[in-house]
Amino acid sequence: MSASKHILLLPGDGIGPEVVNETVKVINWFSQNGPTQFTTSEALLGGAAYDAVGTPFPAETVTAAKKSDAVLLGAVGGPKWESLSIAQRPEKGLLGIRKELGLYANLRPAICFDALADASTLKREVIAGLDIMIVRELTGGIYFGQPRGVETLPDGTRRGFNTEVYTSPEVDRIARVAFELAAKRGGRVCSVDKANVLECTEMWREEVTRVHKESYPQLELSHMYVDNASMQLVRNPKQFDVMVTTNMFGDILSDTASMLTGSLGMLPSASLGAPNTPGLYEPVHGSAPDIAGRNLANPIATILSFAMMLRYSFNLKNEADQLEAAVSKVLEQGYRTGDIMQDGMKKLSTTEMGEAIIKALT
Ligand code: IPM
Ligand code: MG
């Protein structure tokens, strides 16, 4: 496979441009040293897009994304845009591109690099060797459900409402993603819902059970209520292999899971849709406006997101392994950036971390 692949970069806001910049160096390294050439171009999304063209989700960005082979996103959002209406806020750009590309499956691996097992607020024995895959449904649920809004009743009371909604095909396809992943890993899926209270997720549980019975009876399926799951993630996270859940529960549980790995600055993600639609790869962390522009942000989550791109979009498994090993090596050498700093470690800036990873690849 030597054909060239095109990656659309969406640096976005806050630390987004910095962490994407370091990842571009890694992309170029693989272009020169791997079997596949990569070309890149940039487009606007989020607050940066709002400032430049008056919308967080420009039509040209969608067009460019659809033409690309994969999309790499930094982060969107920041206090600067918080007073805007929800329709104009940077987050709208992110939700828009996920929806527009049909990226219904969000893969959020929580892996504890051994060198970071002491960086977590949890004890080493709880998290050492941790390897969980959270599969978050990304284009449905309460994030997109109608009706939604805030209205003022005749007596002046304000009423805010959002709707949790899933259809059986939506649950079916995300469940299959989780089972397919589990089949290549530990063979266990835990589906997380709130079936004791929410009818919508009771249906979710029934559909996941049906898919299991029909197509994956050889795998293990369990169900857990979301409140218990959030507790179990902290109590004994290694009990999980693949977790599959709704858009909002997945948003919350993946932030919890990130802390098991030592830092939110370590967590990559892949958002995938139908075959032959470009995948979107982004760090799980946000735009961290407090440290933006100061060469302090940890670029590892974005660099590991590119490793996921190599694996899932370009089927370059060896190259993905090679990049993950390089990150691991740099951490073993005691180099740290961002909030994973520990006593006795060597602190690197964002750009120095990028360079260290390139050096570890060579
Ligand atoms: C995430 C983020 C987004 C989400 C925000 C920025 C819209 O928290 O990717 O987890 O809620 O999906
Ligand atoms: Mg989130």
Image: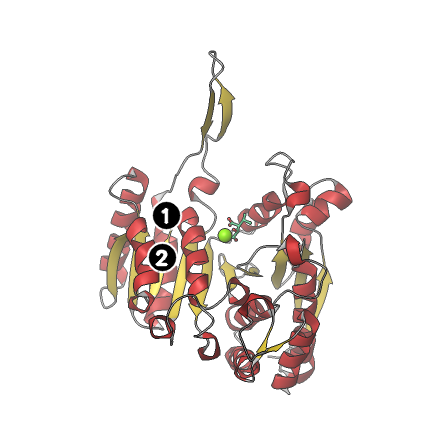
Q: Dot 2, how many residues are within 10 Å of its Cα: few (below 14), some (14-19), or many (20+)?
A: many
Give the spatial CA distance, label 2 vs label 1.
15 Å
Residue furthest out toward the front:
343
Q: What residue type is disc 2 on?
A: Val
Report x, y in % for residue 75.
62, 55
Task: Give above or below for 21 relative to 173.
Answer: below
Report x, y in % for residue 93.
62, 46
Describe residue 130's horizontal placement relative to residue 93 as left or right: left
Earlier sequence position, callout 2 versus callout 1? 1
Q: Which residue is mark 2?
A: 244
Task: Give above or below for 248 relative to 29.
Answer: above
Find residue 306 and report its image quarter.
bottom right
Find residue 217 and report its image quarter.
bottom left
Q: What residue type is disc 1 on?
A: Pro
Q: Which residue is mark 1?
A: 169
The C terminus: image quadrant: bottom right
Q: Looking at the image, which is closer to me, 127 or 172?
A: 127
The N terminus: image quadrant: bottom right
Q: Which residue appears at 46% of the width and 56% of the height?
A: 255
**Circle 2 SS class:** strand
Report x, y in % for residue 339.
56, 66
Report x, y in % for residue 314.
56, 72
**Circle 1 SS class:** helix
Residue furthest out toward the right:
52
Say which of marks 2 and 1 sits in front: 2
Q: Which residue appears at 71% of the width and 52% of the height?
A: 44
